[in-house]
Structures are given as structure tokens and as C-alpha cells.
Amino acid sequence: MTPKPYFREIWLACRQCGHKWDDWQPCDVLIERWVAYVRAFRCPNCSADDGVLIRSKPLTEASE
């Protein structure tokens, strides 16, 4: 039996404008689907699709 896919938080930042935001990523899916999902991320501030980075801490911890 395969595990059920679910969504988990992912913490992102834009290299171009420096905007930081929290989003969601699918888990327990084929790697091809995960990569396609992550490639679709766009900065909500400047709409950049190139240079979206994964942060290591959520916004609540990153601002402290």
C-alpha cells in the first residue's frame, strides 16, 4: 500500500527582491511531480520565477 500524498510547509525567498514567504509542498509523491510543483513557484511580490530559494526557517523564527 502506498502512502497518501499530503502537503507540508515550505519556506521560500526571492533572490531578486528579497521577499520571504511560507508556502506548501506535496509530500509522498513521485519526485518528478514534486520537482514540477516546485518549479512552478513564483514570488508573490515581484512574480519572479527564477531565483526562488528554499529557506531553512519559517517566517516566525526568521524574523527573530
Image (cartoon, rainbow, N blue to C red):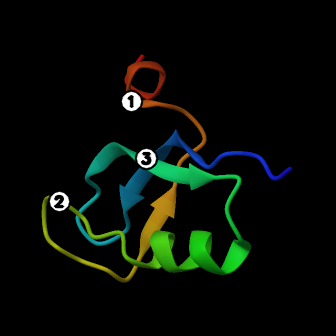
Q: Amino acid at mark 2?
A: Pro
Q: Please identify, in this view, whether the residue under mark 1 or under mark 2 is nearer the observer.
A: 2
Left of 9 or right of it: where is 27? right
Left of 64 or right of it: where is 48? left
First in sequence: mark 3 or mark 1?
A: 3
Residue 11: image location, x then y, percent: 47, 44
Q: Residue at x 49, y 69 (%)?
A: 38
Residue bearing the label numbered 2: 44
Q: Amino acid at mark 1?
A: Leu
- Judge whether 19 appears above or below 7 on screen: below
Q: Which quarter of the rendering shows the C terminus?
A: top left
Give 64 or 24, whichever is nearer the viewer.
24
* Circles 1 and 2 in contact, beta carbons < 8 Å: no
* Circles 2 and 3 in contact, beta carbons < 8 Å: no
Give 19 or 9, whichever is nearer the viewer.
9
- Judge whether 51 appears above or below 10 on screen: below
Q: Residue at x 81, y 53 (%)?
A: 2
Give 60 or 25, whichever is nearer the viewer.
25
Residue bearing the label numbered 1: 59
Residue bearing the label numbered 3: 24
Q: Amino acid at mark 3?
A: Trp
